[in-house]
Image: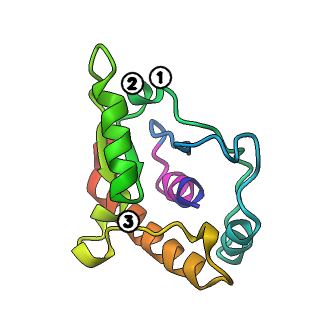
């Protein structure tokens, strides 16, 4: 969901030098479309994604200025991956939710294993606020 939300904000702000992508730390869903409930929620907000899941690569740490994790486990694993690379990448590895500005909301729980749509709505709200604040902070540097 985060890739679609951020891409929509990039398009609206016409941030022509920005690019976004999504990649996972595990290969469980590589090659598959986003989970059905995520796609339904995106459509409810006028968004869509054609993204197929992929696993993060070493090159991503050099290609992107920012790499976001959704929770502390993601963050730790991403930092460990970056620390093993030579030369050391200059990308910023951060919690996406840190852009919300409220400590209690900075962890974005994975709604995949939840029942119903409640967790997807919560994650979407956190992702949207995080991405909006990220674009507000850095969008003028384009």
Q: Identify the residue position indicated by label 2 in the image.
A: 62
The answer to whether residue 102 is visible is no
Residue 14: in magenta span: yes
Which residue appears at 34% of the width and 49% of the height?
75
Q: Which residues are magenta?
A: 6-15
Q: Are marks 1 and 2 in contact (CB under 8 Å)?
A: yes
Closer to us: 13 or 85: 85
From the image, give the main secondary structure of the stretch colored magenta: helix
Which residue appears at 71% of the width and 56% of the height?
34
Instruction: Give the number of the disc on residue 109.
Output: none
Q: Position of residue 55 (x, y in %)?
A: 59, 37
Q: Please state, as top left, top right, bottom left or bottom right, where the N terminus lies in the image.
A: bottom right
Q: Identify the residue position indicated by label 1 in the image.
A: 59
Instruction: Give the number of the disc on residue 130.
Output: 3
Residue 100: in magenta span: no
Of pointers 3 and 1, the one earlier in the residue sequence:
1
How packed mark 1 is, by other alpha carbons closer than 10 Å (few <14, some 14-19, many 20 or more), is few
- The part of the image, by quadrant, that contains residue 42 is bottom right
* Mark 1 to mark 2 CA distance (whole Å): 5 Å
Which residue appears at 62% of the width and 77% of the height?
114
Of pointers 3 and 2, the one earlier in the residue sequence:
2
Colour scheme? rainbow
* Mark 3 to mark 2 CA distance (whole Å): 23 Å
Marks 3, 1: nearer the viewer: 1
Q: Position of residue 66 (x, y in %)?
A: 36, 41
Give the secondary structure at mark 1: loop
Q: Is residue 138 above or below residue 79?
A: below
Looking at the image, the residue that sits furthest to the top is 87
């Amino acid at each position: 969901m985060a890739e679609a939300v951020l891409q929509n904000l990039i398009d609206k702000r016409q941030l022509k030098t920005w690019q976004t992508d999504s990649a996972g730390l595990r290969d469980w869903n590589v090659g598959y479309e986003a989970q059905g409930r995520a796609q339904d929620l995106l459509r409810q907000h006028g968004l869509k994604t054609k993204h197929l899941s992929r696993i993060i690569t070493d090159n991503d740490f050099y290609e992107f200025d920012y790499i976001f994790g959704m929770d502390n486990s993601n963050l730790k694993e991403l930092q460990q991956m970056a620390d093993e690379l030579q030369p050391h990448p200059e990308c910023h590895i951060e919690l996406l939710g840190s852009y919300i500005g409220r400590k209690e909301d900075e962890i974005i729980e994975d709604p995949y294993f939840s029942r119903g749509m409640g967790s997807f709505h919560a994650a979407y709200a956190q992702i949207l606020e995080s991405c909006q604040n990220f674009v507000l902070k850095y969008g003028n540097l384009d």
